Each structure stands twice: as structure tokens, then as C-alpha cells.
Image: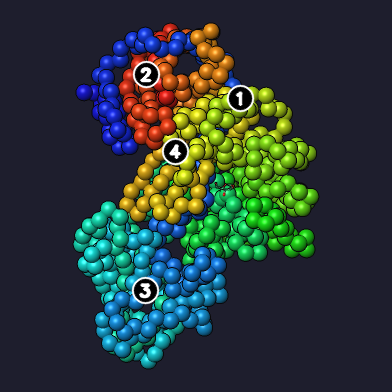
Amino acid sequence: MNRKTTGSMLLALIAMTIGATACQSAPVPEADPEASVKGTMTVNMNDKLKISDTMFGIFFEDINYGADGGLYAELVANRDFECTPADARGWSSKKFWAVDGGNMKFDIATSDPIHANNPHYGVISVDGVGPRLLNEGFGGFRYEKGADYDFSMFARQQGEKPVKIEVGLLSDTGAVLASKTITVDSKKWDKVSLSLTANAGNSTADACGKFYLKPLTAGSAVAVDMVSLFPKDTFKGRKNGLRKDLAQTLADLKPQFVRFPGGCVAHGNSWQDDCYYWKDSVGSLEERKPIKNRWGYHQTRGLGYFEYFQFCEDIGAYALPIITVGVDCQFTGGQQAVPMDQMGRIVQDALDLVEFANGGTDTKWGALRAKMGHAKPFGLKYIGLGNEEQITDAFEQRFKMVNDALVAKYPDIVVVGTVGPGASGRDYDRGWKFARQEKLPIVDEHFYMNPNWFVESAQHRYDNYDRTGPKVYAGEYAAHAQGNPRPNTIETALDEAIFLTGVERNGDVVVMSSYAPLLGKHGNMQWTPNMIYFSNTKIDKTTTYEVQKLFGANAGTNYLKNKLDFGSALDRRQTLKVAASAVQTRDGDTVLKYVNTLDQAVSISVTLDNGKGIPASAKRTVLTGPSFTGKEYTLTDNYIKLGEKFTVNLPAHSMTVIRF
Ligand code: AHR
């Protein structure tokens, strides 16, 4: 078996496959399946259309526990004791903490906190030795045998006695997996830290381990805050970093940009309450301002703007921050707007974000970035103003203030506007009119629609878009099939793939796209479908993930003009169910993508016009599944015989990628 074949088998093994993978050691011409529909495709290898290098990105929002309890690797839940009933009904500063084993007083105090942005902290007092303060984590703690964990907290002795504390990791059965002691001997807040190595892993797949603090000094009291436990092994080894397996799963998509922090989180339900003001998400962790999450939980913002920019840099993606223009969500009782006399702050925030990302270390915000560990500018190029707000007079007035100030001070920043939450309608029409009037470079369109819409309407949506006005960012989209929860199926993914062939074909006008939402934690979902599901121990990729990866990893910089023809073999509606695109990558590779959503195989005779140096064979990847409406899928990697003319067979319900 050659190396390529081994590679293909590996790909099949790591994918969530259910079928056997076909591996060929030598490419053979395609046998023409008798029952297939026959078509032709001509690709003109010389007729190229320049397309955007930011075509396929990811949309990251802290929804479905995407950040805290998800991508952000912090394991302690409510580490800051700042959970409140505003986060979710019944929550309080004690949420996720519990006393175990007897006589321990566990209070919440607020006098003389570490920082005004973090007013609450815990105080534990014991008469004797034995009781422990347990943290439940985000649905438990996942510990791995031999892995190191970095513990830290702020602590202050509350009485006259220094306090010895045992810090430990517990398995789901209550066994101590690691423990060490520290002494708190300061009457002022002091940061203490140590590292623990787990002597065993959790014994169940769900990883319901716990974490504890156990005072070892009888008759003592101690104040604790920012109680933190991180796996040492984060993505790229970053301190205060990201969960390695999840971050890698995102990196594997080869996203060209990362949108953050939303979605609705960007403007919140209310500008006064839960809007994501970026300045509250930077600086040392204890200074950051936790807020209620717009989706009904607590946001520490430990994964804040610095960590976001750093992640983009780590994976070679552009950042696309979405910031408020001073109007909030239209879906929560109507739009509220920041009073005009307070808009100065909103405008200044936008300008300062650019300074934080790109400014010299002699500037206020550039200096903070350097202090946080990144003296070099991040090279921010794009900023989104607003997220699907209702397009009203209030919106337009405020948008213009922010946009004008940004353009005047930073003419190189590319501003992305918004045209409301739908694929059409009042906000869409008014948003587009406004965007043209303001000569915005790009606008953000959103559409969560039924699968068929992606085939019948979205596929050719951009063919006739105006080429002279603002470009398009298809910023939030997903095919929503019936169901509760709404499923990711072969059908939804392939219909999205058909839409994406239209995006590539129109890559001169659609310059960015991102599926939404990205992450959903099992048992903590506010929205379905999502691209990736996960628990504390595993990651479940979906059919949508595989489609996004096939497009992201095979993105082009030129579109090759082509024509797919079925003559009378298919009627108009059936023709819409088979799509193709052809691109040339930055490295000069040619990629042909085919999507077949018909119930039968399709055989295509391909002619590569003006092709030079076409190799004798090419790698072919096929995504398909046993049921169109099911979520199981297979990914098969093999080789196809090539030439100026060749035949490719597309199985029913499949996506095929050929790269050479
Ligand atoms: O993607 C989920 C939500 O859908 C986003 O937060 C919002 O922008 C849209 O309505």
C-alpha cells in the first residue's frame, strides 16, 4: 500500500465513518454506472475570475457554551463567584460550588474585592479539618492520566492564622487523582499557584470529576477568588489558552477569517446590560468584567479580544470583530439605542479597538496589548459594524457616526455593514440602500432557511448581484431541516454545499462566508443545528463540518469558468440538484467540486480546455451517507484517472472533490 493510500485510510478512520473506505493503489478509469444520469462539464483552464482570499471563514459566538465550558480551556465554573440570577434563574454567586463533608462555612463577601469589576468572592471558614469546597466544573472535570494542570487563585487570610489549603483533583468516583498544599499567609489579596499531575484519568467517558479546596488549618478562614484550573496542554501551549482538541478541530477547517464575538452576543439584548464592550474583555483576568451571556448563562470573558486575536494569528486567519454601533437586538422587545449624547463612547471604542490591535506600543491600547504579551501589532484589517439590527433611522444615524470616524482615522480598515436578519424583506432592502449610499465595502447577509431554499434560491442568488456596489459577506447561514433538535444531515450539508458552489462562482462579489453557529455543547444547547458538537471528552463533527472543511481546505483564488450540461437528461428542478465549481488555489492546484443531491448516481464527462501539464491521476475525496435525511456519513479518499478528457461518477447524495 502506498503512502497516499495509507493517508486516505487514516482520514477515513478519524472521520465519523460508518462504511468501508475504498482505497486504490493505482487509479483506474471510471466505469460508467448503467443507472446513472449523464452530463458533461467543460472547464476552461485559461478563463479565470479573481476571487476573494477570505471566502471561507468561521463564525464564533459564545452560544451553546461555546466559550466558557467550551473552547476556553478553563475547567473551574464560576471561578469568579460572579454568577447572578440575571445570568439564569436560580443562579447565584455560589453556583457550581458546594460544601462537601461537614462543618464548613461558605459565604460570599464583597468588601475590599480584588477589583471593582469582580466584586464578589468566597470566604470559607472551618473549625476542624475535613470539609472541602467542591467545584462541579462545566458538567464535570475531564482529567487525563499523566497530564499537568495549572492551578491558581487569589487568596487572603481572613483571621490571624495563615491557612494551609489542600488543592486536589477528584475522579468521578471520588478518588483523589492529584493533590498539593499551599499556604495563604497574606492579609492582602495574593495570587497563589501550583501545578498538579493527574495519577489517573477519569473512569467514565462523561468525565464527571471534581475539583476541591480543603483547608488544613483548624479554626481558620480564608477568602478566595479567581479560582482557576487549566490543562497545561492548551492549543499552541498558550497560557489562559484554548482547549486543544476543539481549537485544532477549528484550525483543520483552514478558516480564512474568524468572526467574533457574535451574533447577538455582539450587541446583547440591551446596550446597557449585556452588550459586548470589548474593553471589558482585555487586561488581566481579574480586571475583566464578567457579564450575563445573552443566551442565558455566565460569560467570564477569559476568552476575550486578546485571546481571540492570538487564536487568529495562531491559525493564520484574519480577524473579523463585530462591534456594536449603539443599537441592540431587535428580537428582544424592540430596538433600543444609545442616547446620542453617549455615542462618544461607542465611537471611541471602535477607534480604540484598532489601536489595541494595530497601534504602536507607545499608544495607550497598543501598550496594553504589549503588556498582555504581544508587542507586535496583530494586523487587524476588517471590522464589522453591527449584527443584523433592524435598519431604522436610529441605526443609520449611529452607524454613520461610527463608520465615518473609523474611515477618517483608519482608511485601510475594511468595514463590513449589516443588512438585517433575513435573506429579503424590509431590513434587507433598507440595509442595502443605506450600504450603497454610504459606499460600504462589504455587507453582512444572514439566512437560516429550509434546505430546499439553498438549492432553489440561494444557489443562483448572487449570479445577478450588482458588481459595482458593496461586496457580500454571507455571514450567518444554515440549512434548517424540520426536527427538534434541528438535525445536521447529508441533505442539509449537501444543500449548503450546493449554495457554496454558487458562492465560489460569484467569488468576485461574495467575498466572505461563514456558517452559524459553530459550536454546541451536548446538554447545553440554546440553538440547533451547529457545525460541531462536543462534550468535555469528545468532539462530534457533523456533515456540515465536513462540507465546510472540503471548501475551506480547497479554497481558490481564481474561479475557472465552466459549464455543466445535462441536455434533456434532467428537468429544470433536477438540474438544480447537481452543481459543480472549479477553482485554482493559491499554490496553482486545480480543484473541481461536485455536489449531487439526486437519488441516483450521475456520470459526468469532463473536458479540461486549454489545460497544460494535466497529471495522469488526481486525489478524489467523496462525502456521502447511507440516508439522505440521516446524519451518518462516510469520507472516502482515493485516486481518479485524469486527462484532458475524463469521466467522474458522482454517487447519489454525495459531494466529490478532485484536486490536482
Ligand atoms: O447564530 C445564532 C444567532 O442567529 C446569532 O447570534 C444571531 O446573529 C442570529 O439571529
The amino acid type, in three-letter code, at marker 2 is Ala
In the rendered structure, are the residues bearing label 3 and label 4 in contact, judged by CB atoms less than 8 Å apart? no
For the view shown, which residue lies furthest in the front direction? 483
Real-space Cα distance between discs 3 and 4? 38 Å
User: Nearer the viewer's eye, disc 1 or disc 4?
Assistant: 4
Identified by mark 3, the residue type is: Ala
Residue 193's x, y, as percent?
35, 71
Q: Would you place residue 157 above or below residue 443 in this image?
A: below
Estimate how packed mark 2 is, as few (under 14), some (14 to 19) or many (20 or more) residues with alpha carbons within 10 Å: many
Q: Mark 1 or mark 2, which is nearer the start of the sequence?
A: 1
Q: Going from the N terminus, do you reach mark 3 or mark 2 first?
A: 3
List x then y, in percent, for residue 295.
53, 56
Query: Of 441 and 136, which appears nearest the observer?
Result: 136
Q: Which mark is residue 488?
A: 4
Mark 3 and mark 2: Cα distance apart in space: 59 Å
For the residues carrying marks 3 and 2, which lies nearer the camera in this image? 3
Residue 12 appears in view: yes
Q: Secondary structure at mark 4?
A: loop
What's the residue at 30%, 55% (across, down)? Answer: 206
Q: Amino acid at mark 4?
A: Asn
Sort mark 4 into few (<14), some (14-19) or many (20+) by Cα contacts within 10 Å. many
Q: Which mark is residue 460?
A: 1
Q: Which residue is mark 3?
A: 98
- Residue at horizontal 56%, vertical 19%? 573
- Mark 3 lies on a secondary structure that is strand
Query: Residue 154: x and y, percent?
Result: 42, 75
Within-10-Å neighbours for mark 3: few <14, some 14–19, many 20+: some
Instruction: Measure the alpha-carbon separation of dots 1 and 4.
Output: 23 Å
User: Helix or strand or loop: what does disc 2 sit on?
Assistant: strand
Q: Which mark is residue 618?
A: 2
**Quadrant holding the N terminus:** top left
Q: CA distance from mark 2 to mark 1?
A: 29 Å
